[in-house]
Image: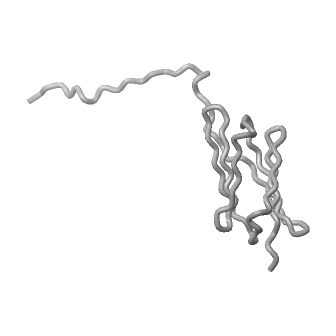
Amino acid sequence: MGGEDKRSHEVVIELPADLITDPPRDPIVDLFVSDGWIHVTTEFLGIDEKSIQVQLKDRSLVIHATGGADIHTREIWLPVAVEKGEIKKRYKNGVLEVALRQRPS
């Protein structure tokens, strides 16, 4: 039974360089606590500002945004408890700034 194994054929296709992109990276996040507020700054380049949703989930800040065909979701653990009704956000030049009032201890 010396037949040829036809399942072992390998096909290699060269893709044009403009179709190969770097994998997406997580956006940079800065977080600091000052004067009773938690300040979170993160980059979201190419995002439609109207698509940005910011919400609290337990002790995490969840940011969801879309830009073109991309969907971005980021969950950031908060080092202290915050007031649920005190969220301020600002988006300018691809940078999202969120301020959350710290819950009194």
Image coordinates for residue 70, horizontal then vertical, percent: 62, 36
Task: Using the image, determine if residue 71 lies above or below residue 18.
Answer: below
Task: Using the image, determine if residue 26 lies above or below residue 21.
Answer: below
Image coordinates for residue 35, horizontal then vertical, percent: 91, 68
Residue at the far front: name it.
Answer: 85
Image coordinates for residue 10, horizontal then vertical, percent: 35, 26
Task: Residue at 76%, 68% (x, y): give it.
Answer: 82
Q: Quadrant of the C terminus?
A: bottom right
Task: Using the image, determine if residue 96 lies above or below residue 86.
Answer: above
Residue at the far bottom: name it.
Answer: 105
Q: 38 or 17: nearer the eye?
A: 38
Residue at the far right: name it.
Answer: 35
Apparent side of residue 11 relative to residue 82 in the rendered image (left or right): left
Residue at the far left: name it.
Answer: 1
Task: Residue at 67%, 47% (x, y): give it.
Answer: 26
Task: Residue at 70%, 59% (x, y): give it.
Answer: 61
Task: Using the image, determine if residue 85 lies above or below residue 11.
Answer: below
Image coordinates for residue 100, horizontal then vertical, percent: 80, 62
